[in-house]
Image: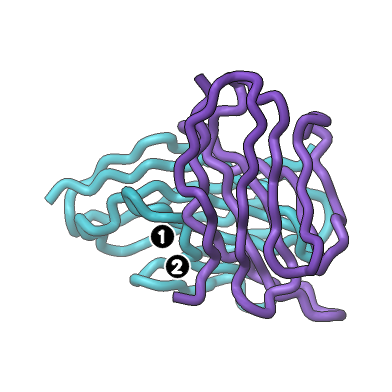
Chain colours: A cyan, B purple
Amino acid sequence: AQSVSQHNHHVILSEAASLELGCNYSYGGTVNLFWYVQYPGQHLQLLLKYFSGDPLVKGIKGFEAEFIKSKFSFNLRKPSVQWSDTAEYFCAVNNNQGGKLIFGQGTELSVKP
Amino acid sequence: DTGVSQDPRHKITKRGQNVTFRCDPISEHNRLYWYRQTLGQGPEFLTYFQNEAQLEKSRLLSDRFSAERPKGSFSTLEIQRTEQGDSAMYLCASSLSLAGASTDTQYFGPGTRLTVL
């Protein structure tokens, strides 16, 4: 079955700490991978995406993610978080024809000032 | 603002009533998706269209749910005989899918929050 697993449900960090959010997927074939973010009171926004090529992708606001095919993983990283990064983060996957996204259950990130 | 828009933003209804939601995609996007999100969960796929054609519908979607995109632009999602379990955020997304390419990115609207009493 197609699925996405996000290991951490709630992460609490202090400002300037480094962040890594785990994402593993179970999906046959070639995949596209995404991280979306939902800030409080706002709608889902795209952080970054991987379609092909360099497995290290950079997104907005200093976020990056690395696709490791052998581990079926697409972890999100940021070297130094800010209070404004407080949000819920969703990992998602679809196949290389596009179409429906399969989402993880989300990770709530709280950054203490 | 030229993003995805949804109407209404909030809907409160009584069990057994019918409700209809509207989604206007980003102009010229040919794909339109509907998802449902409940508290503490990621969005769950319901159905999607390419132009007017409904290409896929989730097996989890009961016969009470129907979606249309008659002119390939806006879409409506109707829920008949609502149940308390239908209470959720209903999200719409759109993307531009080009022939031979697999790189369409979905952009989400603000959602319609449905509460069934």
On what subunit does the disc labeled 2 rest? A
Residue A53 visible within the image: yes
Give the residue type that dot 2 points to.
Glu
Give the residue type that dot 1 points to.
Arg
> Residue B49: image x %, image y %?
79, 60
| Secondary element at image label 1 | strand
Q: Nearer the viewer, residue A6 or A69?
A: A6
**Residue most extreme to the left:** A113
Number of residues whose C-alpha sits closer than 10 Å to that of mark 1, classed few (under 14), some (14–19) or many (20 or more):
some
Number of residues whose C-alpha sits closer than 10 Å to that of mark 2, classed few (under 14), some (14–19) or many (20 or more):
many
Numbered label tally: 2
Q: Nearer the viewer, residue A93 or A20?
A: A93
Q: Is residue A58 above or below residue B13?
A: below
User: Which residue is identified by label 2?
Assistant: A64
On what subunit does the disc labeled 1 rest? A
- Mark 2 and mark 1 residues within 8 Å of each other at the beta carbon: yes
Of the image marks 2 and 1, the number of the one nearer the N terminus: 2
